[in-house]
Structures are given as C-alpha cells and as structure tokens.
Image (cartoon, rainbow, N blue to C red):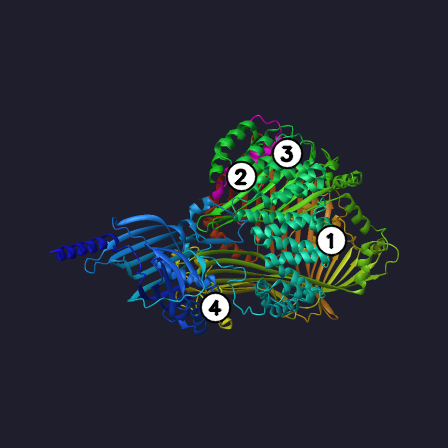
C-alpha cells in the first residue's frame, strides 16, 4: 500500500514538474547535446537577374555540462562556402582554406553560463579573437529565449546578440507532439542599448525629425523555436532564425538593397556525459551581446596580405609618387586605400623607418606625410611629437599634417589626453613646467599655433559626440588659454582661443565664454568687436547641445541696444541655431516691433522670413513660428531695402530621397559705416537622417571699414567707371590706417569646424605693393622669380586626401557585423614647366618690363581624381561579402603653349600645338558590384557587376556620342555617355542609380581643311591702327549687309558723324598652315561713349580663302530710360539670319515696378529652330511643375516676351508669352524684397516700354 502511494506521489510530482518547468528552456548538466548548425547570408537586391553575394557556414555543435549552470560548447566538421553571382545560375563555392582557419579556432572549447533560458558570461581561450567569439555568440543566441506558459502573446525587453531590444512573442502548442512552437520577433530598430556603432560621423548632426519622414536602414529578426518538454526543462529541438535588413542611400520607401541572414539549429541527439571535460585556461569574453572588433585596419573595400606591411607600403608610396610625377594616373589612385590599410597595421618603429627612408625625397616625403595622418591612433601622435622635437619638418608641413591628423584621430579619452601636450607646448603663454615649452619649433610660426588650437577643438567636439556627458577635462586646456589671454588683454590670443572653443562645442565652456560678453559677464568687460564676434560665434555648436543656456545668453545680448549692431545680429543668428520655440519667437517679435536700429530689424525680419518658407525637417516647428512672426512684422519692416543688413536663406528637401540642402548668406552692416562689418556664406546638406555642414566662408571688415566711413565721395551707385575711380581714390589713403589693426579678416569652416582664418595687415599689403612696384629692383622677390623663369623652372605638387570615411556597424544574428561605409578619396596634382625670355632684358627696375617683349614657353598639367565607394554587407577580418558602389571622377587639363606679351602695345599672343592625340578632360564612371573576398585567398576576390552585361527586355541601355568638330582648327570636343539600368518602377528612386554609368568629355583630333602647324590666338587692346569714325563704320556695316537695318539706326542717333568709336579690342583665332593663308576668325569690338548711352558694336569675320561668314552685333544701353537693346545678324555677309533682344524696367505712377524683356527673330538657322521646337514641347509640363498656369492664345509670331511685376514686398507676378500660348503665375515668393527694384533706377523720371504689348 505504502509502495503504491509512493509511486503515485512520484508520478504526481513529475507531472507537476512538467507543467511548471517542462517548457522553460534548460540544459541538463549531466547530458551532452549534439546539434547541426547552419547559417547563411545573402546581400543583393532580391530581384531576378541581379547579382548577389553571400556566405554559408555549416558545422556540428556539441554542448556538454560542466557544472550546474556552466556548459561547454565545441564546434566540429566546419565548412565555409562563398557565393558570388546570379541566383539560380551560380552556386556556393567551397573555401577550404578559410574553413580550416575558422575551424582551427572554433575547435577549441568555450564555456558559457546558462540558466532559465538566459546565457550569461562567455569564456574562451585567451588567443581566440573577438570575431570568432562573435560566431559563438551567434550559435548561443538560439538558447536565449523567454517562455511564459501563462500567456500566449506577450512582449518584453530582453538582452540578445543585438543588444537590449524589444521582443514580441507568440506561443502555440502542437497537440500531437506536445511540442511548444514559439515565435519571437525582435525589433532591432527599437533597442534601448543597441549593438551598433558609428564612426566618422561626429560632425554630421542627427536629424530626428528627418527620421520621422522615413528611414534609410530598417531591420527585423524572427525566431521560430520547437521546444520539447522534459523533466529538466524545455529542450530546443529545432530553431530557425530569419533576419532581414533593408538599406538605401535614400528613403526605404523607394527601394532598397537587401541583406538576409538565415540560421538553423537541429538537435541530432542527447547522450550522457562521460567523465569530466578538460577545458584549459579561459578568460571572460563578455556577455551574449555582440562585441565590435577594432575596425580601423579592416577596410571593407579590399583584402590584402597584411604580413610585413612596411616594404609593401614603401613600394606602394613609391609607385604612387611615380604615377603622379607629371600627371595623375587614374588607374593608380585606388592604391591610396591600400596604403592606408598597411599603415594602420604598421608598428611605430616601422613608421619611423619609413620616414627616414622618404625624408630625403621631396615627392615621396610629401606622399608619406599625406598618408600617415590616416593612422588615427597613438602612433601618429608619437610620430608628430618626434617631428616637433627634431624640427625636421617645416612649419607648413607640421601645421598641415597635425591639422589633418587631429581631425582624423579616434576621439577616445586616451588619445584626447595625449593630444593636450601639443596644445600646451604650442601656446604663447605656456607654463615653464610643461614639457613642450622647450621646443622652439612649436612657437616658430603663429599659424602653427592656430592649427594646433583649432584641431584640438575639433578633436574635443568629436570626443563629446561619442562620450556623454563629456568630461570638462577634455576642454580645460582651451579654457585655460582663453582665460590667460583675457587676463593679459592679448586680443589675437583671445580670438584664437574662442575660435577653438567654438570648434569644441563643449557645454561646460559656456561660463568661460560669458566672461567675454558685456552685460552677461559677472564683471564689466570692454573688448574689441572682433573678440565679441568670436565669443558670440563660439556658441554656435553649443546651441545644439545646451540650447537653453545659449538662448538665455543670446537673448540677453540681442536685447542690449547699446551693443554694436553686428554683435546683436550675430546673437540673433546664434539664437535661431537653437531652434527656439514659439514662445521665444513671439518674445523676439514683440521686441522687434519697438526696435529703432533698422539694421538689426532688417536682419531679424529677413532671417525669420526665410525660415517661414523653410521645408527642411529640422525647421518644421520653427517655420510655423516664424510665419506667424512675419505676418506681424511685415507691415513695419516688409519693405526695408538692401541698404540695410540682411540674412537670406534658401532650402530644399525631398522626402523620397530623404535629401535636401540649404544655403545662407549674412550681410551685417551698421549705421556708421558704408561697408558691411561681416559677410558670411554657408550651406548644409541633409541626407539619411543627418545634417552635414558644408564649406562656410566669411570676411570681416576691420581697418578697411574705417577707411570708407559712412560714404564714398563721388559714388553714384551705377557701377560705372566713375564709381570705380571713386573707390580707388579712397583706397589710396589706406596708409593712414593703424599698423596693429588688420585691414580685414577671412575664415573658413568645413563640417562646422573652423580650420582656417587669417588677418590681412597693412604690413602685408605694403610688402606686396613694394614687391610689384615698377621702381622695385633686385631686392624684390618678383625679380628673383623672373630670373628663375628665364633659367627655366619645374614645379610639381600632389595632395592625397581621404575626404571622409564614415562607417556604421550593426550586429547580425549570425555574429557577423553588418557594415555600411562611405569612402571619398581625392588625389590632386599640378605640374608647371616654364621658361621665359625678356627682350630687352631688365637691368635696373621692374618697370622695364612695361617696355619689353616677354616670351614664355610652358607645359604642364592640373587635375584631380576622385574615388568614391559605398559598401553594404558583411565585413570581418576573415571575409567580406556585400554590395559595393564604386565611382571614379577624373578631371585632367594638360597644356602646352607659347606666349608673347607686349605691354607697351597691349598685345598678347598665344600659340598652341595642333591636336594630334585624343585626351579626356572629364569623366564619371560608376557601377555597383556584388563583392566577395576572403583573407586566405585575397588575390581571388570576386567583383561581379550587379546588373548583367547581357541586354534583356528589362534593361535600358542608352548610349550616345555627340561631337562638335572644327575643320578649321583640326580639333573637336566629344561628349559620350552610356547607361545600363534595369526597370523596377516601384523601386523609385534607387533604380536610377543602380547600374553602370559612364559620362566623358574628350578633346579629339579632327580632319582639317589644311594641315595645321599651330593654333594662334592674338589679343590686341591697343589703339586701332586704322581708326574709323562713325560714318566709316556705318559704311562698313552697309557693305556687309545690303539691308540697312536696326544697327545702322542706332548709330545714326550718335552725336556726330565724325566722332570716332573706341576700338576696345581685337581678337584673332587662326589655324596657321606654313606659308598658306591662315584660316580662322577675327573679332573686333568698337565702343562709342556718350553721356547717357553705352553703344557697343561687335564684328566677327571668318578668315580664309573665299570666306564670307560674318556676324554683326550692336548693343545699346540707355541709362536714362533704363533700357537695353541688342541686334544680331550673322551668316554670309551678315545677311542670312537675324535676331533682336530688348530689356527694360518700367514704373508708372500708381503702378508696380516691372521688368520686361523680349526676344524676336526674323530668320534663324534650322538647327536652332529644331531645338527651339523641342524645348517648347517641354515648357508646359515644366511650367506646371513650378506652379504656372497655361493659357492658349495667339501671340506675336517669332517672338518670346516675359514680364516680371512686383506684386508685393516679397513676391512677384511672372508672365511668359510664346507664339502659341502664355504661361503665368502670380505671387511667386522670392528671397529678396522686390520693392528695391526702384533702387536700381538712378533717375527720377518714369520709363515704359511701348513695344512690349500689354503685361
């Protein structure tokens, strides 16, 4: 009886155990489990007939218990295969060498902790790299699953190989097998801690509002588990995972590249563990979360043998120097990427050895310094330190190399700390205890110090982009320099320090910057405007990181009406960098209504009006706030003219492409000066959820602004010669300016980081004027240059630069890293060979050149080659598979000519050799490839064009070649193009860019009428050897055209028949053929001056035997009536074809300002008529796209007229009449106030154009 009860209790306990624990995944520590594992990756488009690449890995996995919660994993029978080709046509190929390398690592046992469906710490042999451990993580990822028997559908946040992400579960039971089927979907776009990293994108600001309009990368993972219940817990009998990634440079809604990973694990058997398992020495490798490997040397565009890198790098640098010795060899520029990879794996001793080898060769030395900046870790800092101590580089080389090295340096805390020493040693006011003060070289050049300070600031900015919160210790050296300069009242040092703090963009620098700002600083400060300007602008990058603090400071500055206007306007500009909310914009608007300074008001209003029209995502809310503000301010400030300060902004954004751009121009003026205080131009580029600041240029008027004062005596403003003379007369007084104040300053920023600024002082201008003065003698550097030219010079420079290297990494369920990378490399080169002659030679002063004939023979080359790559796929140090866009853009301009210059006779001659060989000026070539590479067989890499070369019904393959050849000069220009695209209409816009593209512009030899010995150009601006009066010129035109037309009528209106038109210049372009009569063209321009009218005649004649082609053009500008006319006739004796043009402004009392134009043709060539008709067919459609309306009506034949009318202060009405229809649009917004049309009419009388018809 007791035995029976005991059996019942045991059975009941077992049943309860199965109910509670039966499906919770677990492993029995006394058992050994054997699984079959297979993983596969495919990268491509997922479209038929498009090439793909992929890898497949198959193996057996043994898992055995070591202790209650510790298990061993061991891999055997591993096989690795690669795919590159077209699905259905090609198959996976075995890679035995790579299989062996991976198997040798994975055959070693790994330990991992496991309990209740959770994988804990993973341990492995010390020598096993993280890339192999990640494969183990991909296998163990199958064991990480949460089972809830009380819920059928549930979601939770849990750790996996992708990080801490959101998972959604669905559970169902198999009634027949009693198995539980678990489906898990991981949203890898919704991870609190995602296994993903960015590199090289610190200066590209994240645009979250753009991401809401669309994504460029999305991915999901789905797991399906079959779990068998056991007494020890659920046993995973089978599991399958499918991961899909979609990537596009644009919006994923418009087509994507696709990466699909699949993996499966199947239980083969379970046995009892026999005896203990020896595992050897182990170290912790971390958790299940994917661990990224140091990727700097692992460039996704190539694989090469990296053993013994020094001789390989040396050989490549020598080859590159040789390939660019005269011009750029386009086929070799891609080797720069190979050099970067080799240098990144070269130890410091190897870099030093290479420097010693290259230092004595100017060309190789330059290449090495350009390349070593991409080492990007502690080795480059140590290398630069030795150069500073040894002083074996010039200040220019040091500044350039250090600037690039710091900007490309990894922004990790250790390297930031190392970089501080360069800042300390380079400062003017360094502490004596600091190590680098003993280096005289570091203080030998002020621009070297600027480079160090600006570059260090950029490094801090990148450091803060990756480490939040950013430690104040990183920016402390710059804060110390700034405060030290403030204490010593060192203006130049204050500007340098503030600009460097602006580059750093560190929020903790706000308190220091405030000490430079009046009304904000705790103690009163009186600083020059250029220091105040630098202080305000130093908050531009902080605006995105601490907007509230910047808003408080800039708002306070803006409201201080006793501050200089330019400082208030700069504060307003920085305020709007913070994207102020509606409430703050309303506050600004209320204060502007009471603003008395019209420069400040005009600047603020024009800037807000520009924002009101913005379409970029980052200004989505600011645009709404500004549109309300503009409506309030328009009645008061809407018609302020361009005499006042302005801020103009234009932008564009396309949701399908997720791309856009904007451009801003700022002109800051004040009531006390006629010249602007500061002019700035900048632009930004929006792409895939980020904002990249493009090149920014700025000019700040310093002393020269004081020179011009409030007005320029004699300036009319009509851009005439008298205006030019008035400006020159003021500039002649520039020597009265102080010595210690710059005349003007210039600066430039790239990616938001200031990298160059310079002050132009009076001393510099004086030295230039002295050097080029006609009275300068042998002491002038120009004299030395002339002597060198007479001996013959040869000058050559190249510059290789990795413009950007942006990389994004994300874990995949297989344990392989997905990488999306963009590389942009440019190699620039210039070569000049020249030899000059001076007859008679100069002996005393440079002024003798004005009476000598100068001859010059020169040849050379200027050009650049740009290589651009985009990689998407799997990239490890063992193998690569993915899709790769490869683009090359070479620009090459070779030259060879002889020149003669006679200054006294104002004569200039050029002789070019005949064109005998074809050469390419410009080309664009790009294609997309499916790529496969592995480290064991780097020479067997495969690159298959994604689109097949065989033309099918789906492939669009246009090819064209257009040439314009001259049988006179024996040369021509050809433009050829070839495209290969496959149609997938739902894939807009990606399919436009997928496929082969080639566009080239070439100069080609052509069949000439006569053999061409040389092509001769002659420009003569001297007095006419045969001056004609108006009567003689009129008779010439009468002979050239039997029809006494419009041009003659114009001449009749001149004051006297015997006044002589000035022969402005004569130009000849002739093909010389030995003793035969030359062929070509001869052009002469005549100018008849009058008080209120400008009259210019151009006569072009063909030169040659029996040549009678001529072109007669007459242009008149009536300054009184603000009217311009031109009349053109050409063909045989100017009789074949005829065309005329008119343009004028009109402003009648009570009407709105208008601009009207008309083109009328009597006879035109057939090809012009043909092209005109072709273009006319597209105009209605284009007009519709731009918001124009169309009205069919009969207008004047052989005529097109247009009118632009100022509809309001910031809009225009436009009407364009064609012979068969009219297109028109009203209230077109424009970025400048059209009321200022009136300013360009410098006479008070009203003008109209009678012959234009009704507007």
**Snapshot quadrant of residue 908:** bottom right
- Callout 4–callout 2 Cβ contact below 8 Å: no
Q: Pointer 3: what residue?
A: 517
Q: Position of residue 744 (x, y in %)?
A: 71, 42
Q: Tag on residue 1243?
A: none
> Does the image show residue 1248?
no
Q: In this view, does 849 lie to the left or right of 312?
A: right
Between the C-alphas of marks 3 and 1, the distance is: 34 Å
Q: Tag on residue 933?
A: 4
Q: Pointer 1: what residue?
A: 441
If you read the primary sequence from the N terminus, does the residue marked by circle 3 or circle 1 appear first? 1
The residue sitting at 62% across, 43% down in the picture is 476
Q: Position of residue 1106 (x, y in %)?
A: 68, 65
Query: SS at mark 1?
Result: helix
Highlighted range, magenta: 593-619
Instruction: Spot the residue most to the top.
Output: 594
Q: In this view, does 112 lie to the left or right of 761?
A: left
What type of secondary structure mainly makes up the magenta span?
A: helix
């Amino acid at each position: 009886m007791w035995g029976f009860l005991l059996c019942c209790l045991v059975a009941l306990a077992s049943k309860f155990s199965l109910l509670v624990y039966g499906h919770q995944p677990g492993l029995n520590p006394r058992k050994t489990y054997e699984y079959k594992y297979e993983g596969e990756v495919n990268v491509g488009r997922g479209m038929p007939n498009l090439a793909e690449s992929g890898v497949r890995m198959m193996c057996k996995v043994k898992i055995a218990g070591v202790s209650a919660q510790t298990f061993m994993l061991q891999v055997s029978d591993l096989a690795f295969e690669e795919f590159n080709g077209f699905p259905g046509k090609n198959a996976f190929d075995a890679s035995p060498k790579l299989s062996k390398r991976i198997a040798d690592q994975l055959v070693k046992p790994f330990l991992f902790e496991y309990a209740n469906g959770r994988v804990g710490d993973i341990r492995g042999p010390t020598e096993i790299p993280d890339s192999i451990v990640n494969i183990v993580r991909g296998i163990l990822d199958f064991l990480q699953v949460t089972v809830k028997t009380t819920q059928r559908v549930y979601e939770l946040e849990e750790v996996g190989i992708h990080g801490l992400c959101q998972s959604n579960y669905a559970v169902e039971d198999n009634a027949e097998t009693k198995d539980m089927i678990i489906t898990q979907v991981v949203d890898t776009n919704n991870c609190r801690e995602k296994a993903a990293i960015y590199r090289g994108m610190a200066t590209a600001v994240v645009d979250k509002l753009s991401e809401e309009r669309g994504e460029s990368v999305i991915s999901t993972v789905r797991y399906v588990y079959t779990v068998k219940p056991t007494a020890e817990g659920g046993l995973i009998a089978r599991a399958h995972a499918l991961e899909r990634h979609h990537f596009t440079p644009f919006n994923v809604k418009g087509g994507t590249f696709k990466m699909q990973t699949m993996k499966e694990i199947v239980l083969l058997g379970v046995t009892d563990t026999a005896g203990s398992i020896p595992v050897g020495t182990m170290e912790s490798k971390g958790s299940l979360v994917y661990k990224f490997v140091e990727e700097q040397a692992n460039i996704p565009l190539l694989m090469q043998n990296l053993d013994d890198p020094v001789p390989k790098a040396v050989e490549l640098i020598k080859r590159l120097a040789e390939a660019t010795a005269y011009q750029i060899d386009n086929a070799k520029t891609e080797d720069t990427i190979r050099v970067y990879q080799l240098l990144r794996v070269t130890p410091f001793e190897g870099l030093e050895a290479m420097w010693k080898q290259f230092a004595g060769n100017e060309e190789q030395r330059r290449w090495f310094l350009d390349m070593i900046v991409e080492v990007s870790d502690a080795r480059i800092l140590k290398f630069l330190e030795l150069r500073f101590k040894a002083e074996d580089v010039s200040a220019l080389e040091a500044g350039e190399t250090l600037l690039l090295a710091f900007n490309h340096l990894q922004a990790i805390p250790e390297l930031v700390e190392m970089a501080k020493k360069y800042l300390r040693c380079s400062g003017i006011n360094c502490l004596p205890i600091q190590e680098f003060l003993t280096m005289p070289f570091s203080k030998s050049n002020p621009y070297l110090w600027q480079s160090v300070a600006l570059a260090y600031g950029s490094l801090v900015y990148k450091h803060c982009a990756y480490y939040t919160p950013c430690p104040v210790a990183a920016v402390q050296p710059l804060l110390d320099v700034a405060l030290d300069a403030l204490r010593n009242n060192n203006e130049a040092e204050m500007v340098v320090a503030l600009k460097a703090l602006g580059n750093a963009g560190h929020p903790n620098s706000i308190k220091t910057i405030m000490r430079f700002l009046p009304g904000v600083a705790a103690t009163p400060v009186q600083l020059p405007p250029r220091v105040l300007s630098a202080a305000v602008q130093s908050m531009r990058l902080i605006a995105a990181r601490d907007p509230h603090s910047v808003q408080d400071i800039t708002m306070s500055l803006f409201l201080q009406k006793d501050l200089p206007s330019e400082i208030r306007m700069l504060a307003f500009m920085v305020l709007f960098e913070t994207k102020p909310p509606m409430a703050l914009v309303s506050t600004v608007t209320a204060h502007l209504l009471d603003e008395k300074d019209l420069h400040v008001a005009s600047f603020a209003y024009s800037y807000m009006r520009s924002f009101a029209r913005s379409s970029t995502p980052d200004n989505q809310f600011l645009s709404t706030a500004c549109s309300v503000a503009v409506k309030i301010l328009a009645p008061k400030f809407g018609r302020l003219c361009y005499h006042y300060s302005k801020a103009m902004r234009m932008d564009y954004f396309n949701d399908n492409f997720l791309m856009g751009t904007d451009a801003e121009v700022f002109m800051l003026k004040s009531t006390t000066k006629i010249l602007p205080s500061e002019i700035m131009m900048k632009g930004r580029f929006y792409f895939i959820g980020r904002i990249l600041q493009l090149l920014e240029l700025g000019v700040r008027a310093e002393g020269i602004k004081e020179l011009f004062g409030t007005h320029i005596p004699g300036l009319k403003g009509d851009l005439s010669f008298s205006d030019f003379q008035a400006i020159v007369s003021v500039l002649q007084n520039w020597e009265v300016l102080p010595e210690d104040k710059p005349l003007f300053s210039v600066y430039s920023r790239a990616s938001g980081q200031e990298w160059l600024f310079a002050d132009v002082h009076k001393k510099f201008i004086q030295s230039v004027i002295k050097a080029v003065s006609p009275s300068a003698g042998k002491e002038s550097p120009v004299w030395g240059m002339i002597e060198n030219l007479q001996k013959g010079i040869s000058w050559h420079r190249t510059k290789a630069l990795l413009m950007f290297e942006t990389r994004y990494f994300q874990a995949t369920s297989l344990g392989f890293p997905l990488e999306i990378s963009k590389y942009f490399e440019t190699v620039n080169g210039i070569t000049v060979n020249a030899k000059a002659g001076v007859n008679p030679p100069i002996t005393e002063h440079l002024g003798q050149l004005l009476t000598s004939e100068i001859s010059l023979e020169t040849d050379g080359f200027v050009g650049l080659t740009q290589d651009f790559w985009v990689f998407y796929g799997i990239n490890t140090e063992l193998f690569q598979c993915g899709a790769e866009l490869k683009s090359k853009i070479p620009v090459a301009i070779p030259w060879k000519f002889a020149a003669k210059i006679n200054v006294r006779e104002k004569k200039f001659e050029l002789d070019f050799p005949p064109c005998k060989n074809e050469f390419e000026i410009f080309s664009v070539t790009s294609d997309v490839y499916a790529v496969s590479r592995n480290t064991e067989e780097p020479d067997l890499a495969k690159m298959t064009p994604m689109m097949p070369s065989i033309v099918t019904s789906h492939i669009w393959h246009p090819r064209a070649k257009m040439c314009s050849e001259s049988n006179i000069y024996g040369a021509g220009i050809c433009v050829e193009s070839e495209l290969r695209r496959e149609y997938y209409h739902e894939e807009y816009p990606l399919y436009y860019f997928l496929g082969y593209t080639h566009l080239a512009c070439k100069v080609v030899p052509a069949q000439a009428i006569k053999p061409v010995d040389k092509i001769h150009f002659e420009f003569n601006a001297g007095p006419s050897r045969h001056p004609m009066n108006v009567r003689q010129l009129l008779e010439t035109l009468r002979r050239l055209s039997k029809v006494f037309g419009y041009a003659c009528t114009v001449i009749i209106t001149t004051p006297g028949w015997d006044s002589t038109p000035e022969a402005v210049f004569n130009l000849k372009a002739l093909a010389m053929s030995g003793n035969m009569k030359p062929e070509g063209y001869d052009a002469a321009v005549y100018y008849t001056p009058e008080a209120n009218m400008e009259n210019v005649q151009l006569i072009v004649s063909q030169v040659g035997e029996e040549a009678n082609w001529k072109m007669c053009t007459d242009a008149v500008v009536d300054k009184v009536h603000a009217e311009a006319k031109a009349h053109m006739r050409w063909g045989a004796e100017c009789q074949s074809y005829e065309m005329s043009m008119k343009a004028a402004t009109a402003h009648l009392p009570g009407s709105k300002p208008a601009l009207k134009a008309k083109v009328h043709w009597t006879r035109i060539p057939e090809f012009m008529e043909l092209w005109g008709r072709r273009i006319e067919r597209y105009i209605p459609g284009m007009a519709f796209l731009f918001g124009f309306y169309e009205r069919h009506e009969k207008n004047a034949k052989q005529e097109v007229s247009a009118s632009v009318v100022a509809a309001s202060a910031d809009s225009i009405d436009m009407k364009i009449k064609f012979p068969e229809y009219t297109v028109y649009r009203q209230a077109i917004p424009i970025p400048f106030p059209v009321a200022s049309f009136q300013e360009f009419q410098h006479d008070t009388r009203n003008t109209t154009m009678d012959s234009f018809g009704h507007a």
